[in-house]
Amino acid sequence: MLDYNQPIDRAGPEAPQQKSQAGFNVLELVNLLWRRKIAIAAAALLGATLAVTVGKSVTPRYTATAQLYVDPRELQLVDRELTPRAQDVSGMAMVVESQARLITSNSVLLQVIQQANLDKDPEFGGGGDARSLMSSLLGLIGLQPRAPSAAETKEVQLAALDALNRHITVRKTEKSFIVDIEVWSTDPAKAAMLANTLTSAYLAESRNSQASAARRATNDLSGRLKELRERLRSAETALATYKAQNNFVGTQDALISDQQLSASNQRLSAARAATMDAQARLDQIEASRRTAADAGANSEALQSPTIANLRAQYADARKKYAEQAGELGPRHPALRQTEKQVEDLKRTINEEIDRFAQSAKNDLTRARDFEASLNRALEAQKRQSVQLSQAAVRLRELEREADASRDVYQSFLKRSRETEEQETLNTSAARVIGEATVPQRRSFPPAMSMFAMIGFIFGALAAASWFVAAELLSAGATAPAAPSPARRERTPAPRAPRAPEVSRTPEIAQPQPAPEVAQSLPELAAPSLQPEMDENTLIGKPLIARLQEADVIHTLGAILATGGGVDLTRLGWPTLRPGFPLTTLLSTWRDMRTAVARRAGGKAMPVIALVGAGETTGRSVTALNFALAAARDGAHVLMIDADHQAHSLSNKVSRPGKSEPSRLGWLSIGSKAAREIKTVNGISVLPAADGDAGKATEAMRKAIEQARAAGGYDLVILDGPVTPLGAASRKLLDDADALVAVLPTSLDINDGLEEILNTLGRAERKLVGVVLDELTPATQARQRGRQYA
């Protein structure tokens, strides 16, 4: 072993000279080998002879190779294949590799063993010849050989399977779909037969696997068809029954009720038109009768042949009267008779026109009666249509169920028929592109010339090595023993005195700040660790946690409030993200609570006070998240608002609509308004009481003692008190088991920590952790180039 502490030995160059004297140079080695050339040649010939003899004794192996083309792009025989195909190159390569592994699977190899009777072949572990000889001998003496049991048959098959697996080598050519199947055997014909049998068994297994997959799919689909058929029958029966019960009768396009409603509406429109026509005709007749004009000057009178005949007679009578009036005197009987005839004709015409008017009145009355009857029938049909419309909601639901059941049944039936037909289809594109032929040369052992050459070389080397070793041993025995150089005394280097070990407070590895945060935040000077003998006066290095935006989520406050109870995650403050139990922040806070439990000395309910510098809202937000983290770990937390000035937490929790009597607990701080509020987060909040700070502090201390005596809480978290501390606040800190400082990164961290430590005084030994609040708005820091302590 080298000693690097010793000086360099100047007599070192003499060693090579001694070594050269004890050893051989090249000339001496050549002379030695030349003197022993006959013996070396004889040894080489002997080695060649032995190698050839060994080569002749080794059983030869013959390897036959068959080539398969395994194309993953199978034949597209039907529109919807049962198994999807690989589309990308990597997927195709995986398919080809899987098929190559399938060639040497047990199912394929067992088929080869069964077809080639390898379980009876001695080369593959079978005892065919011995068993045949034994059977023949037993047959000569009249005995039948014992049939092998199932276990023996299984054992023989497993032995043949293992042997056949060793005889097979499958190689896949790179970047191609060609697979080479190599099978070796002591018989060349058997090797070729096994290779071809293996390819045939693989192709048959591939077809059988496809048919088996299609058969399983068909059986599964057929098993579901009966249930789907019953479901469809039930849905259609329910639909038909509901139609019959609610009188839903109609054609495929519309219901009869809808058709009747449409026809009635059309008939009512026609009846209203007929009524209006009859009314107009009557009005026209009445108007012509009231006027001084000719009463027969209307369409009905003009179209009547009776009126036309009477008007012709009336015209003839007037003409005759005019002629007689010119010839006869006014009192002539003939003239008076003609005048009477004219008046009779005029009266007859008026009577005929009156009959037309009466007929128009009768038509109008009949049209109005018909219209009223149609209107009543239409109203009845409308009421029936409304009832049917209400019942049609359920009808459409039943129709949708029937249609869905029918579609599913038809799709399953169609797919079952498709898979049933696919059982007889062979979609595999794998084929044999090169059958195995009987090998003409053995694959092992190599040629005898190679054996002779290897034996000759090894024999010569062995003889030469023997002579060189013998010469060295003889030279070493005759040479005088060289004096061994005196060994130098090594003085061990003086060991540096070990510094006494100092007990250290266990520290938790703190997370490294992000680069942009580390550049913008000043250095945090942690309290100095000076261990002393008394454990009570020991000031340990506090744990440091960073509350960042990545750890919280922001809510909308009262907009998201629900009526299920007070939810602290919906106060409008940023709260911890749910579902991240292993973040660095939560781990550090868990370590802080562990340190608090150690400091509490076995108390059932330790008290932690969170104090801070700067704005109080950031400290309250940190305290709330600290409590939520503890509750997430399963602790029952009592959170007390110890800030009697700002009341940030109390104002958030106790706002109107958040403090119903059903959610109030039994603890209180001197008033009903400051009574404990139970939340849905596993945290009970005790709001701050208004009034004097001393009275509020005493009330909080009493509430803590009551909670500790009654039990039910695992941890008490004080939000505050506010700095600078008063006499009452110092009493509250004296009752606390540990303190956690909250430092906003928007302010100078060192100044804030100094301010807190100066304010705490002797209570600084209770400081177990520091929380860097990075949620506050970033401002220009007063110090540059510092990092976290």
Image (cartoon, rainbow, N blue to C red):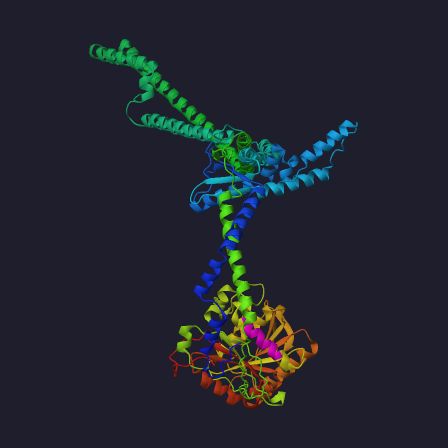
x and y percentages locating residue 169 in the rendered image:
53, 43
Q: Nearer the viewer, residue 758 or 620?
A: 758
Q: Is residue 581 visible?
A: no
x and y percentages locating residue 79 in the rendered image:
46, 33
Q: Residue furthest left?
A: 326
Image point 42% across, 76% down: which residue?
518
- Please tell me whether the stretch drawn in magenta is mainly helix, strand or loop: helix
In the rendered image, residue 724 lying in the magenta stretch gets the answer: no
Q: Is residue 727 above or below residue 122?
A: below
- Left or right placement of residue 360 versus residue 501 in this view: left
x and y percentages locating residue 216 in the rendered image:
59, 36
Q: How many marks?
A: 0
Q: Residue furthest right?
A: 142
Image point 44% across, 47% down: which residue?
90
Q: Is residue 268 visible?
A: yes
Image point 79% across, 29% down: which residue?
143
**Residue 52 picture quarter:** top right
Q: Nearer the viewer, residue 382 or 12?
A: 12
Q: Is residue 523 above or below residue 115?
A: below
- The segment highlighted magenta reads 586-596
x and y percentages locating residue 288 in the rendered image:
32, 26
**Residue 347 picture quarter:** top left
Q: Nearer the viewer, residue 19 or 356?
A: 19
